[in-house]
Image: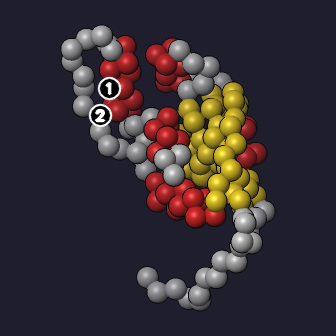
Amino acid sequence: MTELWPVITILPKNYRGIMDILFTSPNHFNIFSEGIKMVEDREFSHTAIRWFDPIIKRTVIFHSTIKGVVFYSESRFLEKNKIVEAFTLDLDADSEVEIKAWCHDMAGGHYDYLGILKSAINKVSANATITLPLSDSFAQSTACAVPSACSW
């Protein structure tokens, strides 16, 4: 695709990007989320990435839902979810751009229920000699999104 106009990014020399890693849970009862919390023995069932976009002057939240991998405004996200805990990352400009590009590329992916089930079975049967192979689908669990993004 040909760009209609050149894109010029001008950032201060010592620019630092701020992103939050969110550990979340639905505001309402959700059998899948409850199952994840039970298997993982955690208060949260999902993870998300949050950042402020200075161009559109909005806070963006990237996470997986039953509808797939999506971007939400913070207000819409909080209508259906609660933040159990949050951690802030201080990133250099290149890392911030790389993570945002990765999120953009993952958006629209499908939620892999079979992958979550396999993950749960593997977790519960950790002492067993059988391990089910996991798919490489991005959304097998939202929990895989954050470690992947944080590898930068």
Query: Is residue 104 something that shows in the picture?
Result: no
Tell me, for residue 118, which label it has, or none: 1
Q: Percent position (x, y) of residue 145?
A: 49, 43
Q: Earlier in the sequence, mark 1 or mark 2?
A: 1
Which residue is depicted at the point 70% across and 77% down? Answer: 10
Q: Describe residue 127's horizontal placement relative to residue 102 as left or right.
A: left
Q: Residues within 10 Å of mark 2 (few under 14, many from 20)?
A: some
Tell me, for residue 35, which label it has, or none: none
**Closer to the camera in the image, 149 or 40:** 149
Tell me, for residue 134, which label it has, or none: 2
Q: Residues within 10 Å of mark 1 (few under 14, many from 20)?
A: some
State yes or no: discs 1 and 2 in contact (Cβ < 8 Å).
yes
The three-letter amino acid code for the residue at tag 1 is Lys
Which residue is depicted at the point 72% across and 71% down? Answer: 13
- Farthest residue toward the right? 57
Q: Using the image, determine if residue 117 lies above or below residue 86.
A: above
Picture quadrant of residue 93: bottom right
Q: Percent position (x, y) of residue 95?
A: 57, 59
Q: Percent position (x, y) of residue 87?
A: 68, 37
Which residue is depicted at the point 46% across and 86% down? Answer: 2
Q: Percent position (x, y) of residue 120?
A: 38, 21
Which residue is depicted at the point 58% across and 64% down? Answer: 94
Q: Using the image, determine if residue 58 lies above or below residue 146.
A: below
Report, in whole angstroms, how far the alpha carbon at label 1 lies from the one at label 2. 7 Å
**Closer to the camera in the image, 97 or 90:** 90
Q: Using the image, determine if residue 84 lies above or below residue 56.
A: above
Badge 1 element: helix
Q: Using the image, determine if residue 62 lies above or below residue 131.
A: below
The three-letter amino acid code for the residue at tag 2 is Leu
